[in-house]
Image (cartoon, rainbow, N blue to C red):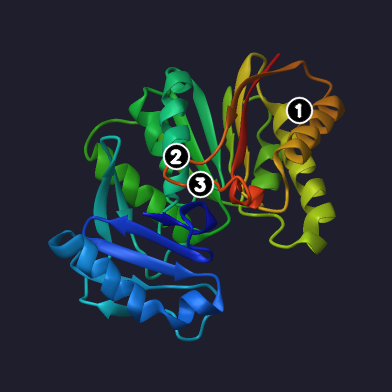
Amino acid sequence: MVHGEGDGLPGLVIDVYDKVAVIQSHSSGMHKDRNLIAQALKEIMGEEITAIYYKSENDKESGEYLIGESTVPVVVSENGTLFKVNWVEGQKTGFFIDQRDNRQLLMKYAYGKKVLNTFCYTGGFSVYALKAGAELVHSVDSSKSAIGLTDENVRLNFRDEKINHESFPDDVFKFLEENKNQYNLIILDPPAFAKHRDAKSNAMKGYQRLNHIALKNIMPGGIIFTFSCSQVINRELFYNTIVSAAILAKRKVRVLHHLSQAPDHPVSIFHSEGEYLKGLVLEVD
């Protein structure tokens, strides 16, 4: 509903799940006015919103309902696909809504593929790949709780259907190195490697290493969806990092798509950092 500077409200994020609005503030002003914001939101939305939850990172006063209450998790529908969302314990506001269109695009490439979804979190890309008819899907995340959420979402969508899905609580870099030439579609959607400018150099090395391993080990003719959500890494820098990874991997690589966040995450032309999500779809020979 609200994406900070892109919506003229710097430091404010509001995501809505079913009838619950989740507010995050990333500035002291928005934090101080959180109750006014909640009241205004309730006035605008009326019965469409029954609860408003306040959750902001690194905030001791975060984690409370400003209006109403709700059980968690709730089940929401995205492009006809079901997901459990837990805004209390989950990352960010509970779900990565910004990848909605990119998950939909994945379905065009996943049929019959052997898919590896790395840093899978709640299994968004995994469920979409299975819906599209992937031959098999493996989901990897270092967090056991994330793997648990992925398994729950797979069961939610497929119940008793026979599907070829397996999840692994493992280090992604290690898993990629140990499972060479097994996949022809790989999703690389890591957490932000750099949250401030001082970490930019190390972040670039991290993106290069991750993409180098994937490019080196994917099957010929394979597809890679690769992303960066680091605000301080701009699109050109991310692109050049992927180029260097391709050179190191000694593979022929073509760019099929340039990706970004969904359009309900608009970017102010005067705040280029608002385009935090960068992505590429690569074909690797």
Q: From the viewer's perspective, tell me whether residue 51 is left or right of residue 252.
A: left
- Between the residue at mark 3 and the residue at mark 1, the CA separation in whole angstroms equals 21 Å
- Between the residue at mark 1 and the residue at mark 2, the CA separation in whole angstroms equals 33 Å
Query: Quick one: quadrant of the N terminus?
Result: bottom left
Q: Report which residue position mark 3 lands on.
A: 120
Q: Are marks 2 and 3 in contact (CB under 8 Å)?
A: no
Q: Residue at x 46, y 57 (%)?
A: 146
Of label 1 and label 2, which has the lower sequence position?
Answer: 1
- 96 above or below 11? above
Q: Is residue 113 visible?
A: yes
Any mark on residue 149, and which? none
Q: Are marks 3 and 1 in contact (CB under 8 Å)?
A: no
What amino acid is at disc 3?
Answer: Cys
Q: Please tell me which residue lies in front, 225 or 69.
A: 69
Q: From the viewer's perspective, tell me whether residue 20 is left or right of residue 271.
A: left
- 18 above or below 185? below
Q: Are marks 1 and 2 in contact (CB under 8 Å)?
A: no
Q: Report which residue position mark 2 lands on.
A: 263
Q: Residue at x 67, y 15 (%)?
A: 220
From the top left corner, tell me how far across and down residue 111 is, in percent. 42, 18
Q: Report which residue position mark 1 lands on.
A: 216
Kindly state the secondary structure of the residue where label 2 is placed: loop
Mark 3 crowd level (few <14, some 14–19, many ≥20, 10 Å Cα): many
Q: Disc 1 or disc 2, which is closer to the eye?
A: 2
From the top left corner, tell me how far across and down residue 31 is, in percent. 47, 79
